[in-house]
Image: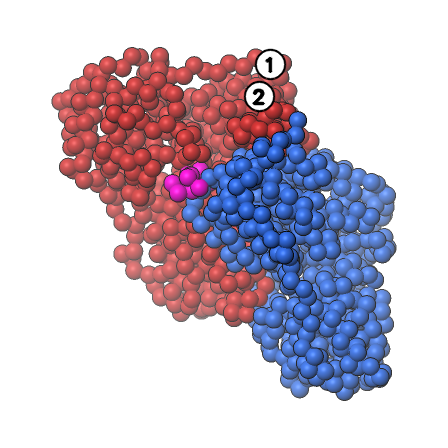
Chain colours: A red, B blue
Amino acid sequence: MSVTPQERSAAHVVLDVLASWGVRDVFTCPGSTEAPFLDASLDRPDLNVWLTPHELTAVTMADGYARFAGGTPGVAYLHTNVGLANGLGGVYAAQLAHSPVVVLNGLKARSIQSKRGFTAPPDVGAAVAPYARWRWQSLRTEEVATDLTRALQVATTEPGGPVWLGLPEDLLARPATEVTTPSHRSRAVSAVRPDAEAVATAATLLARARKPLLVAGADVARHGACAQLVRLAERLGAVVVHEDRRAFERSAFPTDHTAYAGFYASGHPAVRDADLVAFLGGRCFHEFEEGSIAPPADDALVIHSNADPVELGKAYGADVALSGDHRALLTDLLAALDGNESTTDWPPSESLRPPLREHASGQLTVHEALDVLATHVDDRTRIVADATTSNAALFERIPQAVPDQVVTTSCGALGWGTGAALGVQVARPQDRVVSVTGDGSLQFGVHALWVAARRRLPVTFVVLNNESYAAVAAALRRYDRHAARSETYPGKDIAGADLATVAEGFGVHGVRVHEIGGLRKALADALADDRPRLVEVMTDPADLGP
Amino acid sequence: MSVTPQERSAAHVVLDVLASWGVRDVFTCPGSTEAPFLDASLDRPDLNVWLTPHELTAVTMADGYARFAGGTPGVAYLHTNVGLANGLGGVYAAQLAHSPVVVLNGLKARSIQSKRGFTAPPDVGAAVAPYARWRWQSLRTEEVATDLTRALQVATTEPGGPVWLGLPEDLLARPATEVTTPSHRSRAVSAVRPDAEAVATAATLLARARKPLLVAGADVARHGACAQLVRLAERLGAVVVHEDRRAFERSAFPTDHTAYAGFYASGHPAVRDADLVAFLGGRCFHEFEEGSIAPPADDALVIHSNADPVELGKAYGADVALSGDHRALLTDLLAALDGNESTTDWPPSESLRPPLREHASGQLTVHEALDVLATHVDDRTRIVADATTSNAALFERIPQAVPDQVVTTSCGALGWGTGAALGVQVARPQDRVVSVTGDGSLQFGVHALWVAARRRLPVTFVVLNNESYAAVAAALRRYDRHAARSETYPGKDIAGADLATVAEGFGVHGVRVHEIGGLRKALADALADDRPRLVEVMTDPADLGP
């Protein structure tokens, strides 16, 4: 039944190129323009085609996968301009996470494009322009494989990020023999080592600092350099915080370490008192609004490292700015510090850590719910967080002993978490993946439930349902005018959806719980199951987070 | 409790401008950046803020509303770049329908934009560039009202279409006194009358034609010129068809008229035999793929009219090309034909109409299901169709005695229909609105169910569930290679969702039916209810449409 060499199409070559880059999974929501790809996939039993019922699920699966696949890109195959539009929020998430996501976009034949035919507006790729590291539409069959190779190369070359390649269906239907074979030399370029002199300067400043604060950024986890960061903190006697919550993407420092002191935040005593702040592999900052996060004190020294040199000094400048691979960077820093076993003037980190917020109310609070989840977290657990206003509580409450224990997005596009959780599960089949969302975000990413059920991915979906767009209420409180005065919050109340029932409709066993005993049992049951489950936790609508 | 004049913000002025243009409804899915708008809305009890849990629902509601609101624009208020992305498919639908949709987009403060802050990438509006007739981000408080006025003016000026206006939150929070008042002269420009000489030429050709075929396009319905088209057809003795199914947007000719002969299609006997084809207010064509629709015979004369002059002669040229308002155009044509009571050589239109497809199978077919729906259609019924491969059967099966009885989109973005149906219901509270979707498209637009339940909009959602992306299977059959040979269609099988249960989760009473008796009862019950209902019709998965 399989094709003869004469029958092989350009789409077969596309799959060959993907396979040669280690791609075993393609996440798609196809339409008619993907016929050549789908047809060729029948000749590749080694390729896993993940069918999803919405492009946001396809792209966020590719993103979640790519963050845990050890360098293998996540590939999403979308349908023309309309599919691309639906996946765009996921592309933005991949951009901010430097996640190597390759968006292949089936386009109408060139003849139809020139006449503005069905789903063929001019410049389909314009929509992705603000988010893609590189974008191109293949113009001839000859270049399909070299264009794809370039896409893979750009996506995976540090600092990594999403790329877009438009593939008109008429090109992919052409014979494979017309396609030019890409050079075997076209691979991702090697990692970049930071400048030695700059590292030496940073080491000198760090060794001298009496109150050095290290801010553990996403690149540290992404580059597999968490162990080096622990050694650096110990050698310096530094206090370590995670990036501020709006920028946070992934756990990069063990929260059970004595040096750990919570999240970088305005008013944090360690931020206030530090004489040196080293933002290592993070952003400075990803500001929510003017003044939402306090920069280091004027007289503190600032070191900033990031894989993307354009991030350095973006808003507040740095005394030393380093770009490159963070495993190399931290290894070099440790070598430069050799012999310098520092003591510092810091009090115990525990005393610097903001107290956990307690909340007494008749109804279950987000904090109480997360504390129950925390009892289930072990080194195999991955928490994929997309809980908007509850994310801050989650970062605070969930233990993060191993790198990447909590992953999230700083993109602000609701619905990322459900698909991303599936992608993480595909990349890490041995891990226990828990998706934590709000009721709003679950609805944006609801289509992932069908995929979980259909493909029996054992993700547990925890939905913190406060029946509210809490972020809207919080903004109206900050705005402090008519709504705040009258305690009437238009645009906030989204009560009425029974998400456990919605989950059942998509084939995922769902249960709604109202109190802590029910939550304990439902969560234990869900985590013991090898099928996906959804636990809808009805939390106090008055507990709207910060 | 309401604000003093000193407390009025620029957002209050925005609402004043909207009110002065007759806008009583704003469809939104807000986030924090919409706080000034939401806060000001508390001072406008005359404004209906429609909260939706997804931007596609907000934009498609605005689109459905705008198509039936007699010139009042549909206004959607979206949240930053991530909200815009989710609504983009709906903006594309509005573009193709010339639907006056104003997309207001809450953006982060200018200070955050310049630092690429949270949800503040550069050039947010780039995503909408292929779809918006006009786009602009307000730069200063002073221009907010004049920018909005320009947006409203461009959206509503013929041929109409979506516009995008970015409104940074810091601008809208400023005092109202800083805003420049727009001129009361800034209104939509008047309709355009086609050139008299061209109309006279068209009339001469029409009067001479022995077999004139009139193709009833969307502009005829949009301009309220259906009665004139009926008179023209009768005076000429012409045969009338609707636009081809890929371009069809709305009913423009009564299907129970003796002149009516179905849809323009390749192989249609009237298309083959016509000596003159007049595409009136439609496209020629909105091609699905090269050769998917046959142009008129080489020796036939072609007249083409469209409100958008750029559409004229796009693919196949025209002997006479007319642009302008179709009520004026048809009135002028009728006047020019005065005294010309033509007889033609056409056989009865009924004999030209393709026979209805019959389908015998053990399971309920799409055609049978639509025939049941057809028995309920009266002049108050509006069918909003988003059923992909079943749309052709729907256009064929559902009687369309009154203008705009069936409305759909030619944009190819699944999920349009559920939100659009709600928008139509808002604009036409006396009408009985029925949304007809496939199981795939229902899932894309599922969020509209929550709005229907919450706001008690009595739309009946009919879901034709073949558990398939039938369009994918159809494309693989046309591709005719491995999949077709092995009758294995990857990317097709989306079985497993119980959409009646999903509807229940969103608060809409849902019922799943498997046979015709159950469908008859469920549909009668649904249409007798003053609440929304969903009827999930399980159709034969082998009945995958054309």
Q: Subunit of mark 2?
A: A
Q: Which residue is mark 1?
A: A361
Query: Which quadrant of the structure image shows residue A30?
Result: bottom right
As drawn, B134 above or below A383: below
Closest to the observer: B379 or A477? A477
Closest to the observer: A465 or B466? A465
As drawn, B335 above or below A466: below
Prevailing secondary structure class for the magenta stretch in the rendered image:
loop
Q: Subunit of mark 1?
A: A
Question: Where in the figure is residue B535, as x and y percent of width and height?
Answer: 77, 44
Specify the amino acid type for callout 1. Ser
As drawn, A448 above or below A188: above
Q: Which residue appears at 29% of the width and 32% of the height?
A: A280
Q: Are marks 1 and 2 in contact (CB under 8 Å)?
A: yes
Closest to the observer: A100 or B481? A100
Q: Which residue appears at 43% of the width and 45% of the height?
A: B121
Asked if badges 1 and 2 are on one and the same chain, I answer yes
Q: Which residue appears at 72% of the width and 82% of the height?
A: B200
As drawn, A322 above or below B164: above
Magenta region, residue range:
B110-119
Q: Which residue is mark 2?
A: A543
Label 1: few (<14), some (14–19) or many (≥20) C-alpha neighbours in 10 Å:
few
Specify the amino acid type for callout 2. Asp
Residue B91 visible, this orientation: no
Quarter of the image that includes the C terminus of chain B: bottom right
